[in-house]
Image (spheres, rainbow, N blue to C red):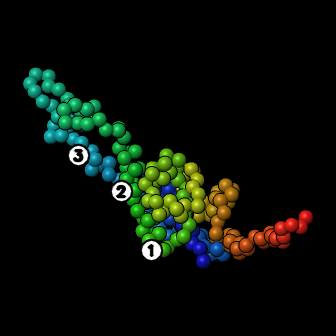
Amino acid sequence: MTTTWIAVADEGRARIFSARPQVALRELEDLLAIDSRRAEHAQAQDAYGHLGGSISGGGGGTLHSPHVGGPGHSAEPRTNSADHRAQQFARQLAQRLEAGLHAESYQRLILVAAPRFLGHLRLSLPTAVRKRLAFDVAKDFSKLSLAEIEQRLQALQVPSPARHAPAPFKPSPRPQAAPPRTPGRS
């Protein structure tokens, strides 16, 4: 029996549901992103309580910000802390989905996530998990009830294994080959 996991997520919360043919959708996990804003803030402050650098020299001094570049800093892509936290959470969710796949907890995956977070999540998914991805939906359903999620998925025409059993496989009939022609006869 095929089990489908449906991951419904945004930047701060991910809910994983399990669906099987003729069995009601059920919630397996509710993951929350770790709020690391305080830790990031503490790391960014220097001994003087200034954000992003230190004061050096005499007189008026200068403020050096590591986000601007300068000695010892390479030009790195800029991401704000909220975006960085979203990327971390996407990696965390991708690892959980990979663990579920390795445990053979599901054979098929559906992702429903806030559009920006879905982009982070797609980039974080390992190849093996991507191969199980049936489809994804760029919508934020993370705060909806189980019944509302089912209704919205149905409205989007996302087939749910809980509602429909897969049709049995029927090989298509082979066309009969024409009888071989004998040389010399027309």
* Quadrant of the image occupied by residue 64: top left
Q: Which mark is residue 34?
A: 2
The residue that appears at 59% across and 57% down in the rendered structure is 135
Q: Which residue bears the numbered disc 3? A: 43
Q: Position of residue 174 (x, y in %)?
A: 77, 71
Give the mark, 1 or 2, whose residue is nearer the N terminus. Answer: 2
Amino acid carrying mark 3 in the image? Gln
Query: Taking the image as drawn, is residue 119 in sight?
Result: yes
Give the mark, 3 or 2, whose residue is nearer the N terminus. Answer: 2
Q: Secondary structure at mark 2?
A: loop
Amino acid carrying mark 2 in the image? Ile
Query: Taking the image as drawn, is residue 143 in sight?
Result: no
* Quadrant of the image occupied by residue 169: bottom right
Query: Would you say 155 lies left or right of 174 here?
Result: left
The residue that appears at 31% across and 38% down in the rendered structure is 76
Near mark 3 (Cα within 10 A), the count class, few <14, some 14-19 or many ≥20, is few
Q: Secondary structure at mark 1?
A: loop
Near mark 2 (Cα within 10 A), the count class, few <14, some 14-19 or many ≥20, is few
Q: Which residue bears the numbered disc 1? A: 103
Vertical placement of 117 versus 20: above or below? above
